[in-house]
Image (cartoon, rainbow, N blue to C red):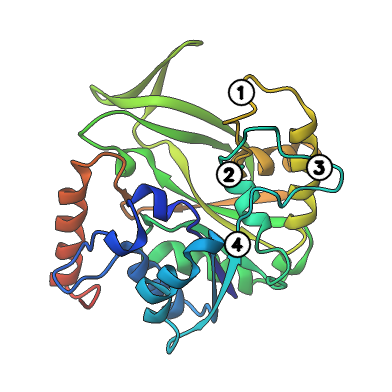
Amino acid sequence: MTLCILAAGMGSRYGGLKQIDPITDSGKFIIDFSVADAIKSGFDKVVFVIKEENLKDFRETVGKRFEDKIKVEYAFQKLDDLPAGAKIPEGRTKPWGTAHALLAARNIINEPFAVINADDFYGASAYRLLAEHFNAKCTRKKGDYCMVGYVLENTLTENGTVSRGVCLSDEAGKLLEVNERTKIERYGDSARSVEASGEYIIPLDATVSMNCWGFTPDIFDGVMAGFKKFLSEPHDDMMKCEYYLPFAVTELMAEGKCDVRVYRSEDSWYGVTYAADKEKVKASIKKLIDSGVYED
């Protein structure tokens, strides 16, 4: 099993890889815990999707931490990695989003694999759930995917609003749709999203997507076809529009090309959406270390 970590945006978000902020006293990053949890659950390869120009710094700062623990490979998200016949719009410099980042790994992943964001903390149960899915016979079928969702309340921040994909599943746990909601904040005993299309009240126990997926390798063909369609369509801003992984999976579901099983994690998800979130993340990780869940 392979863990694919989308890390092409790390350099820009952190102002340079060498300036990544550690979240423990010993200097560990969130990504250290993600890889450790994956190894414990039986993953034997990790693929980092990065910018090619960051390879040296990324390997020195991050990659070398794992080379004696798990097979490590790198894939590069490139602006000009496009479907045949597609062209970069004149003046475009921004990458094409998370679905495009995933495509960068299409030539080095040939086995069931998980996908996560580099700077999000998912908790150990996510990797156990993914491994259990991969180890089931049914996951050898094409289009038999899964997603680990989280309890909305466990993903909120006290420092502002967040965007989340609210998941609707049937009684068997099959994903039916993902409704993207922006500007979500706590609102009494619920959460509220106020958008241009209206106000939405969301239960705090709703299951939301945090970009933690399990796929078989056929996903690459489906995403490439979807990306080609995306590029052929008009967009309000061709300099900034992006093709996101949840959108790509939703399209494949609508076309009947995949089924997605939703597994729900009760762990808290941690990410640094706002600068003020960092101290809470550090304190939460420290609590897990002090209780013996992790080593520092």
First-in-chain label (1 vs 2): 2
Which residue matches tag 3? 256
Specify few, some or many for label 1: CA neighbours under 10 Å numbering under 14, 14-19, or 20 or more. few
Cα distance between the residues tagged 4 and 1: 24 Å
Give the CA separation, mark 2 to mark 4.
11 Å
Local crowd size for mark 3, using a 10 Å CA cut-off: few (<14), some (14–19), many (≥20): few
Compared across the picture, whether 280 is left or right of 47 comes to left
- Identify the residue position indicated by label 2 in the image: 95
Residue shown at 63%/19% (left/top)?
Answer: 236
Q: Quadrant of the C terminus?
A: bottom left
Q: Nearer the viewer, residue 6 or 156?
A: 6
Is residue 171 visible to us here? no
Snapshot quadrant of residue 95? top right
Residue at the spot of label 1:
237
Q: Residue sitting at 44 percent across and 74 percent down?
A: 59
Three-letter residue code for mark 2: Pro
